[in-house]
């Protein structure tokens, strides 16, 4: 999820719900965005798959989403700390092109196999 929801929660010239708490605001916006993505995947992308227990699916979805976030962060860390690329363009390419592509591939493969399997897990 982008910075707009976080900004709406944290940056409204002293009138925001979470003014001066950008980490809490970012966490709330990230969980909300991932929850909306879960609902979309459950009922649209994988709507034809058998339904599992909601708590199990949601927890696994959130955990795998967190791993995908770490993949993006690792790409950014490699760019900055190993390759010593420190420009805004390098940061965006590392995190938002390479990291996003690898994270999306990871999510696609793991969601369809573990979160929304074709056959119920036994």
Image: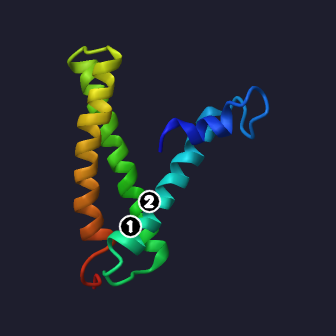
Q: Position of residue 95 (x, y in %)?
A: 31, 32
Using the image, determine if residue 91 lies above or below residue 45: above
Question: Label 2 near label 1: C-beta < 8 Å?
Answer: yes
Q: Which residue is mark 1?
A: 41
> Which part of the image, by quadrant, shows the C terminus?
bottom left
How many numbered callouts? 2
Residue in the foreground of this view, choosing between 29 and 120: 29
Residue in the foreground of this view, choosing between 20 and 81: 20
SS for dot 2: helix
Which residue is located at x 35 percent, y 56 percent? 64
Q: Position of residue 8 (x, y in %)?
A: 65, 38
For residue 79, the mark is none
Label 1 crowding class (10 Å Cα cut-off): few <14, some 14-19, many 20+? some
Q: Which residue is mark 2?
A: 37
Residue at the extreme right of the image, as rendered: 15
Using the image, determine if residue 34 lies above or below residue 25: below
Name the image quarter holding residue 7. Answer: top right
Which residue is located at x 67 percent, y 30 percent? 11
Q: Image check: 83 left or right of 26?
A: left
SS for dot 1: helix
Label 2 crowding class (10 Å Cα cut-off): few <14, some 14-19, many 20+? few
Which residue is located at x 25 percent, y 23 percent? 79
Q: Image check: 65 left or right of 98?
A: right
Q: Position of residue 51 (x, y in %)?
A: 39, 82
Using the image, determine if residue 22 lies above or below residue 104: above
Name the image quarter holding residue 69. Answer: top left
Please say which color scheme the image uses.
Answer: rainbow
Q: Position of residue 45 (x, y in %)?
A: 33, 69
Task: Give the Cα separation between the discs numbered 1 and 2.
Answer: 6 Å
Using the image, determine if residue 45 lies above or below residue 20: below
Name the image quarter holding residue 41. Answer: bottom left
């Amino acid at each position: 999820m982008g910075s707009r929801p976080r900004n709406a929660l944290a940056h409204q010239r002293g009138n925001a719900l979470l003014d001066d708490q950008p980490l809490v605001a970012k966490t709330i916006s990230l969980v909300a965005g991932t929850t909306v993505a879960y609902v979309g995947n459950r009922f649209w992308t994988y709507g034809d798959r058998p339904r599992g227990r909601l708590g199990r699916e949601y927890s696994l979805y959130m955990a795998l989403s967190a791993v995908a976030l770490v993949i993006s962060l690792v790409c950014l860390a490699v760019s900055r700390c190993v390759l010593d690329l420190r420009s805004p363009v390098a940061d965006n390419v590392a995190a938002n092109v390479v990291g996003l592509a690898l994270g999306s591939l990871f999510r696609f493969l793991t969601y369809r196999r573990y979160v929304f399997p074709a056959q119920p897990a036994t």
